[in-house]
């Protein structure tokens, strides 16, 4: 390497380091760290020993269970505080009487966003802390409930004492949740509280199914529309649809039906659209059969068939204020979660879509809508990236790298980054690229402030 190039490379690295340092100071001085506790729950009485209820959630399910757990304790008079595990302080943990932790696992044993750093903390010895841990996972993955087990080992190593064995919950298994609920009496909850029951499936109808990528070399993607057979519920962007993946007549009429795990999908529409819309890729298994949920919605259920569905809020992907610039990043069926956010934003707000698929000729998912968003002023900038076209950046992470200065500018303007799509590949590459551009510590601060949110699967 010649001296002139070395000097140029050193100068570039120095500028990048200076920019990351400046960004970090800006983020930490202008924006406050999130302290998330539900507004409808009173703050714990600081004069009494506190029981912490901590949650680590990617799609909102662990948060929902934490709220149920906290209410059960508070209804029995237990002094309780409910917090995301990412925001609880060392002093709060060290000063707590006990802790109940509800932790999801994403992908192959990964922690929900922001939660992994809890394991990297220099916590004091916790010899006086009693705890219980509810681990949520999917047994079809190799590292089932992996993050929950990591937390358990970490707390034991710090000297904390488990009052119960770790409870594993496979795909929301009701029996395991009842087991958890029954153990809450050890922490002061009433033994007579009614059993928790999952929300009942609502009655919906498969109104429409449109093939979005005919001729694609990839698996078929379908735009699904479901309409209610009763009143239309309310939801906001980021919400999750839980689908019963089989004939719904028995579960909707109180009869017996096979016990099938629900399947979750990002909602692509708003209540003003009059129905729930999904974007679903038909998954084909190694034996040639279709995935449980995608096979039902995309192939087996006839148009007009009743569908059992319930909706769940997901605060981890809830929208920012209209004044907040949004960088929306995704690939494949991730366009669903991004679509709901874009549709909810007023025209003229600052929105930047970075979206990737295979081939522009066959995989321009919702391409006409994207063109309309540009024309209507709903998108200030749009970068479409097609990995098989052979020109320009191949993947969304490459596009982010190419636009590094603009990304930093949007973040400096108070912008938020929302990522929706594939956990394997896309989401990890995007995270690595953002950490390189913004610095990992700054990216972690964005998570704490709710300005880096992901709905990945």
Image (cartoon, rainbow, N blue to C red):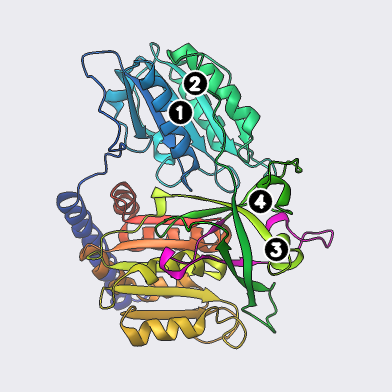
Q: Residue furthest right?
A: 287
**Mark closer to the observer (3, 2):** 3
Residue placed at 56% from the left, 37% from the top? 198
In the rendered image, residue 33, in percent from the top left (x then y), is placed at 24, 44
Dot 2: few (<14), some (14–19), or many (≥20) neighbours within 10 Å?
A: many
> Which segment did they paint magenta?
265-294
User: Label 4 belongs to which residue?
Assistant: 244
Query: Would you say the residues marked 1 and 2 are in contact, meaning their CB atoms lie under 8 Å apart?
Result: yes
Cα distance in 3D space between marks 1 and 4: 28 Å
User: Label 1 belongs to which residue?
Assistant: 101
**Mark closer to the observer (1, 3):** 3
Find residue 305 and name its label.
3
Find residue 132 and name its label.
2
* Mark found first going from the N terminus, 4 or 3: 4
SS of the residue under disc 1: strand
Quick check: 297 left or right of 181? Answer: right
Cα distance in 3D space between marks 2 and 4: 30 Å
Q: Nearer the viewer, residue 389 or 173?
A: 173
Residue 277 is one of the magenta-drawn residues = yes
**Mark closer to the observer (1, 4):** 4
Residue 370 is one of the magenta-drawn residues = no
> Where does the N terminus fall, quadrant-wise?
bottom left
**Residue 409 seen:** yes
Dot 1: few (<14), some (14–19), or many (≥20) neighbours within 10 Å?
A: many
Residue 97 versus residue 66 in the image, above or below: above
SS of the residue under disc 2: strand
Residue 107 versus residue 197 in the image, above or below: below
């Amino acid at each position: 390497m010649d001296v002139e190039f070395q000097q140029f490379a050193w100068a570039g690295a120095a500028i990048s380091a200076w920019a990351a340092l400046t960004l970090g100071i800006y983020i930490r001085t202008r924006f406050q760290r999130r302290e998330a506790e539900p507004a409808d729950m009173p703050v714990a009485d600081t004069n009494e020993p506190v029981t912490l209820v901590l949650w680590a959630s990617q799609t909102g399910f662990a948060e929902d269970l934490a709220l149920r757990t906290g209410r059960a304790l508070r209804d029995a008079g237990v002094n309780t505080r409910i917090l995301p595990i990412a925001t609880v302080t060392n002093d709060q943990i060290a000063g707590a009487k006990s802790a109940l932790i509800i932790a999801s696992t994403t992908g192959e044993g990964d922690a929900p966003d922001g939660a992994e750093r809890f394991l990297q903390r220099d916590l004091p010895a916790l010899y006086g802390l009693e705890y219980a841990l509810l681990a949520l996972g999917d047994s079809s993955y190799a590292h089932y409930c992996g993050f929950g087990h990591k937390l358990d080992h970490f707390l034991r190593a710090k000297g904390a004492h488990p009052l119960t064995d770790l409870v594993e919950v496979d795909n929301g298994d009701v029996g395991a949740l009842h087991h958890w609920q029954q153990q809450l009496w050890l922490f002061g909850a009433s033994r007579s509280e009614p059993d928790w029951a999952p929300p009942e499936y609502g009655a919906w109808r498969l109104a429409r199914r449109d093939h979005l990528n005919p001729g694609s070399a990839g698996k078929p993607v379908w735009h699904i529309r479901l309409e209610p057979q009763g009143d239309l519920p309310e939801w906001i962007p980021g919400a999750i649809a839980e689908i019963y993946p089989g004939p719904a007549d028995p579960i909707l009429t109180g009869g017996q039906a096979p016990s099938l795990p629900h399947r979750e999908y990002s909602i692509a529409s708003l209540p003003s659209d009059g129905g729930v819309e999904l974007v679903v890729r038909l998954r084909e298994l190694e034996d040639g059969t279709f995935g449980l949920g995608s096979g039902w919605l995309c192939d087996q259920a006839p148009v007009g068939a009743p569908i059992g569905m319930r909706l769940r809020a997901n605060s981890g992907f809830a929208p920012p204020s209209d004044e907040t610039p949004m960088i929306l990043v995704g690939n494949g069926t991730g366009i669903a979660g991004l679509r709901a956010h874009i549709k909810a934003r007023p025209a003229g707000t600052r929105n930047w879509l970075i979206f990737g698929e295979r081939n522009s000729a066959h995989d321009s998912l919702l391409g006409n809508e994207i063109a309309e968003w540009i024309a209507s002023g709903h998108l200030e900038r749009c970068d479409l990236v097609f990995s098989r076209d052979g020109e320009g950046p191949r993947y969304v992470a490459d596009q982010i790298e190419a636009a590094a200065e603009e990304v930093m500018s949007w973040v400096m303007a108070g912008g938020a980054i929302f990522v929706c799509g594939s956990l394997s590949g896309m989401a990890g590459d995007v995270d690595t690229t953002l950490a390189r551009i913004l610095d990992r510590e700054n990216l972690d601060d964005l998570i704490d402030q709710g300005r880096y949110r992901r709905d990945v699967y």
